[in-house]
Image: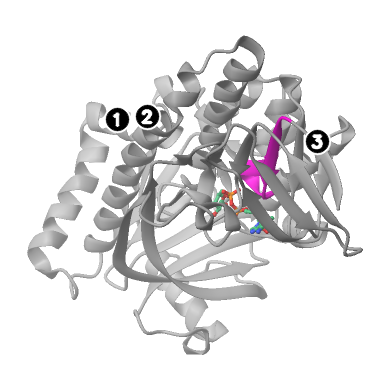
Amino acid sequence: MARESTSVVVVGAGPAGLTVGNLLRRCGISCVVLERQPPARVMGRQRAGVVEYRAVRMFEEWGLADRLIGDAPSDEILEIRVDGNSRLLGQDEGNASRRMILCPQQVFVRRSIEVFLAEGGDLRFEVADVALDGLDTGRPAVTYRDGAGVRHEIDCEFIAGCDGDHGISRASVPAGVLSVYAYDHGIAWLSVLADAPPPQHPLLAVSPYGFAGHFARGPQTSRFYLQCGLTDQVPDWPDERVWQQVRARLGAADLPTGPITDREVFRLRSVVYDPMAYGRLLLLGDAAHIIAPLGGKGMNLALHDAEVFVRAIRGVVRDGDHTALQSYSRDCLRRVWNYQEFSRWLTETLHDAGDDSQVGPFRRQLARARLDRLSNSPSAAQAFADLLAGLA
Ligand code: APR
């Protein structure tokens, strides 16, 4: 058994864990990041695609923005298309500087790894049998087995549980400690990645055929989301049906298509675990909460958790001040619930407004009134823009 010691062990090298690593290094706090997968798997995972304005500002403050997201395209406008008619949100002057960065997750992750390693960060891939011990003591430890089969034990002051929804961190908290708030939205989506030109602006579309979304994932790559039946499977959606539905729902009969490179069906769900901490283990990102995709907050909540975590650890390690650590869970959860509400509101509105076969004509009219309010009321539009930017 190889034994060593550091200030923070970070479990998981997704957006949350890598951001923790990069910010800790900027504070001069030692850490080791442990990742179960090989680099190619971590850098190839295609998921989120938008870095909200709040997170852009955060990376600027930490001197990381240029290297992580500097040359990625940006946009301040969101298009909502209702029955083929376009409505552009975020055009007014006040929002012009609040650009969201359109940066595919795999690009963000690859650059985060490059920055971390270039600055001498300790990132270990392909670790197996990770286990957390002594969480309720002052000196916890993480054990794992490396690729050569050698067992390691790292003792530390804190553990950052950044290993996603199926990781070992949350599973290491004794039963009964965490309250679970889980919600199934009763909606399924087909997600399609295609070598097809991206939209002019991030696009959400409402139509009687159901919801559709169209987002950039690169200069010639698009992610499409199509509301589908709850029992649908991937084989129910051959190319021809995908493109016919994309065109009908976006109201764009001549939309260019392209080869489909990935296709999956999933149910929209949300979960929050409370508190986001147990003893010396703090949970971040997907390990602590899952949010439905509309609103683009999954990765952004993880980035927020990372900064709150690092400020809290810095308080303890550098200044002996435990105040921020004690309020870590409360501070993160306040934001998590605010954006769960935003995401649920947007999900309900965009799905109810289209196909009334599930919810009935009354709720369809209510949802359309909500969408009209975003176009007709400057204060409603501003509140929406604040939430989109992550500033509410
Ligand atoms: N040991 C080490 N690493 C692990 C373990 C383990 N036992 N279990 C999981 N991991 C790794 C995964 O391989 C993955 O690289 O933890 C990482 C978790 O990354 P994500 O699932 O991306 O979670 P997070 O960093 O919280 O992501 C935040 O970004 O795109 C969004 O949908 C994503 O909402 C999520 C957000």
**Residue plotted at (45% across, 65% down):** 252
Q: In the figure, 190 relative to 174: above or below?
A: below
What stretch of residues is rendered in magenta? 7-18
Res 248 → quadrant: bottom left
Residue 158 in the image, given as x and y percentages of width and height: 62, 34
Q: Earlier in the sequence, mark 1 or mark 3?
A: 3
Q: Is residue 15 highlighted in magenta?
A: yes
**Residue plotted at (73% across, 59% down):** 36
Work out how far the residue at label 3 is from the one at label 2, CA to CA, in angstroms: 31 Å
Residue 76 in the image, given as x and y percentages of width and height: 49, 34
**Residue plotted at (25% across, 65% down):** 354
Please tell me whether mark 2 sits on a helix, a strand or a loop. Answer: helix
Q: In the figure, 336 relative to 221: above or below?
A: above
Q: Nearer the viewer, residue 85 or 264?
A: 264
Q: Amino acid at mark 1?
A: Ala
Q: Is mark 1 within 8 Å of ligand 1?
A: no
Q: Which residue is mark 1?
A: 383
Q: Nearer the viewer, residue 127 or 175?
A: 175
Q: Earlier in the sequence, mark 3 or mark 2?
A: 3
Q: Which residue is mark 3?
A: 116
Mark in the foreground, 1 or 3:
3
Q: Which residue is mark 2?
A: 386
Q: Residue furthest left?
A: 362
Res 122 → quadrant: top right
